[in-house]
């Protein structure tokens, strides 16, 4: 049974779904060191924002197939290392947008009316009505930096508060902006025009310290900033200075460069600070855990997860057709590496028939995996296959042919060797099972097994019997036989699926038989 390690608190429904398919250990006590010690036993790891999934952590997870981020931001996971090590990362990006949007609105009104400051003053015995006068958000300009899921929900709510909303995002959906009454602007325009700026961007290289001293100085005098995104997108020291100097009216921070934070910003009287609570609502946590559990269960079962961070997405209705072709693609590729003697000069995948119109990227990745895994020391998965292929200069061309003749769908891998000879391996899926139907000029119908004998020979009486006797003498049991030939007594192919691996002496004996061109033992 697969084992899943959960290092932070996640919703009970998600945990229950995980427990149906795997052994689940929730360990909230792990330190970075004990995490490294524990990881080798686990097939999947689930974290929230506080566990740092570094390259070292991923390397310690020698069995890890998937890391689940129970939430949106994946900046605590070293994605480059996950790609290199072939580990899939899934998250739950649609689960907590409302929670963060509602908190953002709460913080904006908190800033406008000094709610936290007035509250603690009163709890400390001070009735300071004149000190805590505020302002109304109605008619003010809200500048949204990033216009993705969360910012859109903030806009929807800010509109009801009768605010003017402007947004900057390098990839802005103009139609959605128009629907929500949001005006797209440049970042500079937003910075200088907004009364309140709210950040809703991921922490990536391009956004690190986006709000540095210079940009903060370009903000309108007396304006406000809210950060429910990630600490690293604001320079906290520069923000402290901007509050101290009176240039900014206030700041509300849910997230910090280092959590828990230690800088002076935490106690600044014009700052509202929270311990990263954006996603911490009952509703968001239930949804987040359910979504991440679904992703993990899918990956462990070999299905395409809905929210893969580092793999192509395939819609469920397409997956029903495409999914089984991953197994076939990988098998065709592994077969080709064992049946083609000379180095390959080029590879081409041909997607025939109904396959031509579907998402082909996952099939290509499975073929790459099959081509690479025979000659690789480390783990090869569809996630790191493109990386390893680039390292080795291996490229694959793809052709989509909607007009497959014989089969509804036919997947072909065409390998051209350095002598210019073209080798074609074709297959199809029947009732969810991979069938190999073409080896070069021969058409057959073979359900591949883990150990097989392939012979290319002249079609002559007695040939099949001689090979059967040689295998019998070596105590190798034949489970099925497939033959094909160009013409009676012409060139022929035979495939025997066998229960045991064929020892090299037996293969040599077979290769020494009359009428044989070449025999291969193939392991898939
Ligand atoms: N405080 C909390 O507990 C939570 C924080 N978050 C943070 O919020 C972030 C945003 O979440 P979503 O809206 O769901 O993500 P999203 O992916 O839907 O939206 C992010 C948007 O930022 C835009 N963007 C990227 N680089 C940009 C740049 N340089 N300038 C302006 N826009 C840029 C993207 O084009 C995208 O539209 C997450 O990455 C996460 O770090 C998310 C959930 C909870
Ligand atoms: O989903 C996100 O990106 C968050 O920041 C939420 O973090 P959390 O899961 O509450 O540690």
Image (spheres, rainbow, N blue to C red):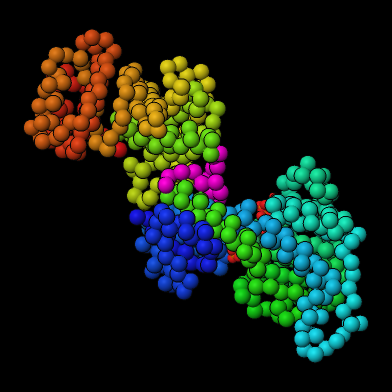
Asked which quadrant contains residue 271, the reply is: bottom right
Q: Over which residues does the magenta segment extend?
A: 301-315
In the image, what residue occupies the spot 16% across and 21% down?
A: 464
Q: Is residue 266 left or right of residue 187?
A: left
- Image quadrant in which you'd find residue 207: bottom right
Instruction: Give the main secondary structure, helix, strand or loop, of the magenta stretch.
Output: loop
In the current view of this chain or complex, which residue is farthest to the left?
473
Residue 56 seen: no
Vertical position of residue 523 compared to residue 67: above or below: above
Q: Where is residue 95 in the image (x, y as percent from the top left)?
A: 62, 55
Q: Tell whether position 499 is magenta.
A: no
The answer to whether residue 409 of the structure is visible from this angle is yes
- Left or right for 6, reference 185: left
Viewer-nearest residue: 314 or 493: 314
Q: Where is residue 238 in the image (x, y as percent from the top left)?
A: 75, 72
Q: In which quarter of the image is the C terminus?
A: top left
Residue 361 in the image: state x and y as whole percent. Answer: 51, 37
Count of numbered marks = 0
125 vs 259, left or right, is: right
At horizontal 46% and vertical 37% (from top left) the residue drawn is 323
Give 376 or 406, whichever is nearer the viewer: 406
Q: Look at the image and tell me in which quarter the N terminus lies.
A: bottom left
Q: Give the percent coordinates (x, y) of residue 10.
A: 53, 64
Q: Residue at the location (49% across, 43% down)?
A: 304
User: Residue furthest toward the top?
Assistant: 488
* Relative to 241, 396 lies left or right: left
Q: Determine whether 370 is above or below 94 in the image.
A: above
Residue 234: name its quadrant.
Answer: bottom right
Residue 394 or residue 40, whichever sits in front = 40
Residue at x-position 89% and y-position 61%: 138
Q: Is 305 contained in the magenta span?
A: yes
Query: Which quarter is ligand 2 in?
Result: bottom right
């Amino acid at each position: 049974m697969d084992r899943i390690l959960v290092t932070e608190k996640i919703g009970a429904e998600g945990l229950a779904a995980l427990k149906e398919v795997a052994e689940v250990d929730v360990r909230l006590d792990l330190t970075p060191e004990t995490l490294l010690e524990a990881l080798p036993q686990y097939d999947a790891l689930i974290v929230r924002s506080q566990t740092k999934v570094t390259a070292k952590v991923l390397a310690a997870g020698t069995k890890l197939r998937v890391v689940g981020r129970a939430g949106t931001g994946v900046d605590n996971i070293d994605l480059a290392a996950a790609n290199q090590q072939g580990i899939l990362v899934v998250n739950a990006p649609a689960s907590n947008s409302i929670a963060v949007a509602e908190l953002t609105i709460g913080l904006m009104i908190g800033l406008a009316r000094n709610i936290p400051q007035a509250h603690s003053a009163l709890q400390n015995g001070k009735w300071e009505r004149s000190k805590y006068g505020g302002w109304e958000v109605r008619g003010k300009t809200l500048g949204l930096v990033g216009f993705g899921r969360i910012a859109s929900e903030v806009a929807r709510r800010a509109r009801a508060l009768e605010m003017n909303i402007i947004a900057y995002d390098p990839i802005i959906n103009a139609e959605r902006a128009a629907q929500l009454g949001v005006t797209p602007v440049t970042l500079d325009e937003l910075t200088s025009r907004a009364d309140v700026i709210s950040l809703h961007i991921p922490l990536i290289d391009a956004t690190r310290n986006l709000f540095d001293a210079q940009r903060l100085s370009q903000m309108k005098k007396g304006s406000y900033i809210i950060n429910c995104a990630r600490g690293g997108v604001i320079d906290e020291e520069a923000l402290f200075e901007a509050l101290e100097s009176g240039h900014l009216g206030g700041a509300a921070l849910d997230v910090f460069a280092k959590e828990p934070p230690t800088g002076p910003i935490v106690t600044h009287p014009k700052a509202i600070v929270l311990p990263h609570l954006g996603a911490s609502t009952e509703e968001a946590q239930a949804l987040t855990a359910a979504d991440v559990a679904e992703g993990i269960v899918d990956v462990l079962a070999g299905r395409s997860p809905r929210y893969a961070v580092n793999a192509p997405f395939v819609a469920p209705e397409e997956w029903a057709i495409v999914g089984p072709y991953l197994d076939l693609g990988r098998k065709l590729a592994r077969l080709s590496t064992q049946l083609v003697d000379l180095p390959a000069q080029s590879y081409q995948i041909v997607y025939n028939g109904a396959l031509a119109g579907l998402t082909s990227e996952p099939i290509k990745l499975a073929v790459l995996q099959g081509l690479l895994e025979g000659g690789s020391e480390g783990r090869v998965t569809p996630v790191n296959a493109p990386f390893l292929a680039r390292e080795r200069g291996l490229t694959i061309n793809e052709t989509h042919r909607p007009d497959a003749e014989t089969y509804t769908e036919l997947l072909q891998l065409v390998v051209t060797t350095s002598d210019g000879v073209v080798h074609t391996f074709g297959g199809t899926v029947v009732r969810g099972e991979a069938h190999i139907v073409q080896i070069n000029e021969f058409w057959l119908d073979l359900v591949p097994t883990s150990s097989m004998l392939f012979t290319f020979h002249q079609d002559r009486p007695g040939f099949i019997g001689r090979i059967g006797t040689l295998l019998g003498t070596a105590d190798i049991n034949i489970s099925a036989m497939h033959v094909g030939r160009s013409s009676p007594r012409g060139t022929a192919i035979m495939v025997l699926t066998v229960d045991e691996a064929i020892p090299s002496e037996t293969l040599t004996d077979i290769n020494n038989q009359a009428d044989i061109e070449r025999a291969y033992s193939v392991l898939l």
